[in-house]
Amino acid sequence: MSFGEEREMHTATCGDCGNECQVPFKPKEDRPVYCREC
């Protein structure tokens, strides 16, 4: 992977507010993901 390469983004639901957000990793069911606002 080169430094200039685009990361694959994944859609996740924020564990706090419930909004959808984009994260650069594949979210796991057993770990919460939080958006930038939270």
Image (cartoon, helix red, strand yellow):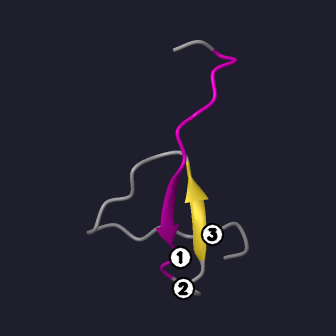
Disc 3 and disc 1: Cα gap in Å?
5 Å
- Structural crowding at the residue carrying mark 3, measured as other residues with C-alpha within 10 Å and reported as few (<14), some (14–19) or many (≥20): some
The residue labelled by disc 1 is 14
- Assess whether residue 29 is covered by the magenta stretch: no
Whether the residues at callouts 1 and 2 have beta carbons within 8 Å, the answer is: yes
Where does residue 37 sit, x and y in percent of width and height? 73, 74
Disc 1 and disc 2: Cα gap in Å?
5 Å
Residue at position x 63%, y 69% in the image: 35
Disc 2 and disc 3: Cα gap in Å?
9 Å
Disc on the earlier residue, 3 or 1: 1
**Looking at the picture, does residue 37 appear above or below residue 8?**
below
Count of numbered circles in the view: 3
User: Residue lying farthest bottom?
Assistant: 17
Whether the residues at callouts 3 and 1 have beta carbons within 8 Å, the answer is: yes
Residue 18, numbered label? 2
The residue labelled by disc 3 is 35
Classify residue 31 as left or right of residue 19.
left
Residue at position x 70%, y 66% in the image: 36
The range drawn in magenta is: 3-15
Element class at badge 3 = loop
Residue at position x 56%, y 70% in the image: 34
Element class at badge 1 = loop
Where does residue 4 sit, x and y in percent of width and height? 70, 18
Disc on the earlier residue, 2 or 3: 2
